[in-house]
Image (cartoon, helix red, strand yellow):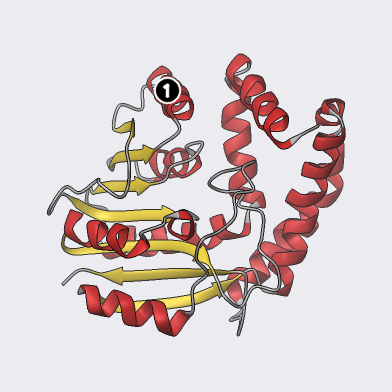
Amino acid sequence: MEQREFSQALRNFLHKRPSFRALFYTALEALVVSFWHIRKELWRIALARGGRSMHVLDAGSGMGQYEHFMSTRFPSWNICALDRDEFEVSECNRYFVERKKFRVYFRKADLDQFRQPDCFDLVLSVNVLEYMPNDHRVLRNFYDSLRSQGNLLLAIQSDKALHVQPNFTNKLLGNQETLHRYNALGLKKLLKEIGFTKIKAHYAYGYSGRLSTRLGVRIPKYLLKKSRDWIWLLPLYYMLAYPVILLLNLLDVVFVHWQGSELIVRAVKP
């Protein structure tokens, strides 16, 4: 099965079976390594604000997996989710409205142009910046759109990757070629020049994360590309692999990595 056919097959499957979408979101939250790192940082931000409501911008929302997590764990947050895929924007709006999650709104937008000064308490962007031709402009738009003391939270491709991980959390099936890969020190310097402070960056997808990705993402993806019929056997596969994947993801979050396929970056607008 070709990449576009695979993408369309999964979209059609979720469109015709909306009850599977929540299960799909839950699977992503458990299986995708970067999700564990982002989830940890979101909890830190939420606890630091003492449970107060926030206005959140998800720049590059993909299939809405982070909106599902945030709207479930932090129901008082108001979330504006941006993506350039009109079909996915429509599908996500339909799904969240049906579940009466009215604080979440998806819209089509170009991140090169999107800028709403002093509007958001948090800007989240996962596996998006590396595909933007003018990534510096997008970062400045993020900075301008944040309120004072607002947080920027990024997951981006690292220049220390042994090989580029499948961009599973954003463009799930896209296999686009990355335009940028980032060095931790270089990115910190750029963010500081833009005006950010309290900049922290750490690597994700160390050895345990790469092994987890192979078990949880790459092998099932390969099987589904061979035949759509594998989708009915995947539950059995995950029943066997699930405990190992969870352990590997936990290890990736707990231990510090000197190198990894992704950088998790957090910064604050003063």
Q: Name the residue under label 1.
A: 90
Quadrant housing residue 235: top right
Left or right: residue 43 versus residue 251 is left
Residue 45 is at least partly visible in this image: yes
Task: Pick the quarter of the image with the C terminus.
Answer: bottom left
Q: Nearer the viewer, residue 202 or 178?
A: 178
Left or right: residue 29 versus residue 199 is right
Q: Is mark 1 on a helix, strand or loop?
A: helix
Q: Which residue is drawn at 86% across and 37% down?
A: 236
Q: Which residue is drawn at 73% across and 74% down?
A: 207
Residue 68 in the image: above or below residue 89: below
Q: Position of residue 213 (x, y in %)?
A: 72, 57
Q: Which of 248 and 163 is in front in this view?
A: 163
Count of numbered circles in the view: 1
Q: Position of residue 179 (x, y in %)?
A: 51, 61
Q: Where is residue 239 in the image (x, y as percent from the top left)?
A: 82, 43
Label 1 crowding class (10 Å Cα cut-off): few <14, some 14-19, many 20+?
few
Q: Which residue is drawn at 15% across and 49% down?
A: 119
Going by the numbered disc 1, the residue's amino acid type is: Ser
Residue found at the far top of this picture: 16
Residue 146 is at least partly visible in this image: no
Left or right: residue 198 versus residue 213 is left
Residue 92 in the image: above or below residue 222: above
Q: Which of 156 and 21 is in front in this view?
A: 156
Task: Pick the quarter of the image with the N terminus.
Answer: top right
